[in-house]
Amino acid sequence: MNNPDKLLLLGDQAIALGAIHAGISGVYAYPGTPSTEITEYIQDSPLAQERKLHSTWCTNEKTAMEAALGVSYVGGRALVCMKHVGMNVCADAFVNSAITGVNGGIVVLAADDPSMHSSQNEQDSRFYGKFAMIPMLEPSSQQEAYDMMEGAFRLSEEKKLPVLMRITTRMAHSRAAVTVKQNFLEVTRTGRPSVPADWVLLPGNARRRYLEVIEVQPQLMALSESSPYNLYIQGKEKMAEKGIIACGIGYNYVMENFPEGCPYPLLKISQYPLPVEKIAALAASCREILVVEDGQPFVEEQLKGILPSAYQVKGRLSGDLPRTGELNPDNVRLALGMSVTQVYAPAKQVVSRPPALCNGCGHRDVYDALNKVVAEYPDAKIFGDIGCYTLGALPPFRSLASCVDMGASITMAKGAADAGLFPAIAVIGDSTFTHSGMTGLLDAVNDRANITVVISDNLTTAMTGGQDSAGTNKFEAICLGLGVEPEHVRVVVPLPKNMDEITRIIREEIEYNGVSVIIPRRECMQTLNRKLKQKRAEKK
């Protein structure tokens, strides 16, 4: 673009740049779509490198949240990033961070995934913010996402609470022109000491802090009422048939259908808790309210407690908008009572193409070997985990019996073995093992569970783009440290030429009555190709 102050940015990139310009000391994250590009942008940013901002991937979201609390304790600003299911992992530290409060500002970025493009569920992170009783922000555009960051850190420090910023996949992965500041903050510290008693959550301290959090709630409500991000637009009529509440990116979907301006009274919400006075003003100017929110019916449900029971509230619960999946301009248009014209018919020659493991992927050879051996055991079950190897549940392998959450393969296999299943096999990836699998393996060792654990090690966090894996070159030592017998920690190279050796080892470890670990190790084809390409470029 000609204007040097304007950049074409993904929503994730706008958030990352806004955080750098807000003076953060570092970003703490575990890779997960659709949040990954935030940390990657900071890692690649020349300004972040010049400032020596911390940007190393954490082992999981809980360790990321806790490290950010450490930054906050000494007065620095920290950004914490994760996808929505990562909020479940960091929930202990996240919820308690409202009770400890913060010194330096903390912004927790949760990227939700309506339609489950790469996720197990459609949970809405706004419920976590309400549960923790902290302020929340939900940008409606990339520009707003950038602009909000400095204010979010300032709000965090003024109210001594973490701030949750919630986005969805479309906001994270769509691009728009963003006007950026030329005069931005240096790495910022509060300069004030933390109060140690606030951070020691013994009951006496926690009760006092909990009362303080309760007492600040009216202030948070007042800030939402006056927030520039919560905009009330009066409709053309004094009493309209319909009013609209549009949250975050839902505001864009509404306005795309009204390029000349919305004819209905409209309340845009991008800061929480809900601005009750603005909602009351909207309700007084219309006979019914349509709630446009991407995710679960978070606002729609609360309106039923705010407005009189006879007042009509429409949205996802009423069926006017789809109950599941992403919103888009078309289904919002239908909810507004407008017709939708199909511009192009779907191409008939395009065949559905489900995801598949890459050609040459080591996971393929792992599943070929497992399927060959498991066919000899009528009752065998293979419990899977989260990663690109989850595709082993699909044709042509159809190997996996389960995939629930990070680390569940090992503990589910243990539970099944406890209940008498033989053989019980767990397949888990390298980064998933260090994320959430190690504690399950320790349980299995302590209980001498009769399970076989396969840690399929491709030397990277492959599913989210090839980030560093926390346990690379450490897995044998970790397993031995957790108590697995040395003779039952086996390493193989998953290649077709090694199939006889791999199947023999799998049989031997299945027949061992105890915990055994097999580590098939071969580098991900994608990261290997990138490295080779980079080497060729360096030689030129």
Image: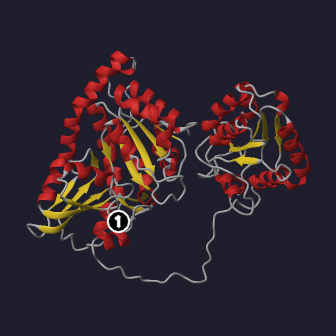
Residue 117 against residue 373 in the figure, above or below: below
Q: Position of residue 152 (x, y in %)?
A: 31, 42
Furthest-left residue in this view: 238
Find residue 72 and report its image quarter.
Answer: top left
Residue 236 against residue 119 in the figure, above or below: below
Residue 480 against residue 436 in the figure, above or below: above
Find residue 431 and report its image quarter.
Answer: top right
**What coloring was used for the rendering?**
secondary structure
Q: Is residue 102 visible?
A: no
For the residue pair 361 and 502, the one nearer the viewer reads as: 502
Q: Position of residue 513 (x, y in %)?
A: 82, 32
Furthest-front residue in this view: 420
Hey, what amino acid is under mark 1?
Gly
Horizontal arrangement in the rendering, residue 185 relative to residue 421 (left or right)? left
Report the residue marked by disc 1. Answer: 319
- Give the number of callouts: 1
- Could you say whether the residue bearing mark 1 is in a helix, strand or loop? loop
Find residue 519 and report its image quarter.
Answer: top right
What residue is shown at x 20% (from left), y 56% (from top)? 231
Q: Position of residue 139 (x, y in %)?
A: 33, 53
Q: Residues within 10 Å of mark 1 (few under 14, many from 20)?
A: few
For the residue pair 21 and 318, the one nearer the viewer reads as: 318
Q: Position of residue 274 (x, y in %)?
A: 24, 47
The quadrant in which the C terminus is found is bottom right
What residue is shown at x 18% (from left), y 46% (from top)? 225
What residue is shown at x 80% (from left), y 54% (from top)? 371
Horizontal arrangement in the rendering, residue 540 relative to residue 377 (left or right)? left
Q: Is residue 282 visible?
A: yes
Horizontal arrangement in the rendering, residue 81 relative to residue 248 (left or right)? right
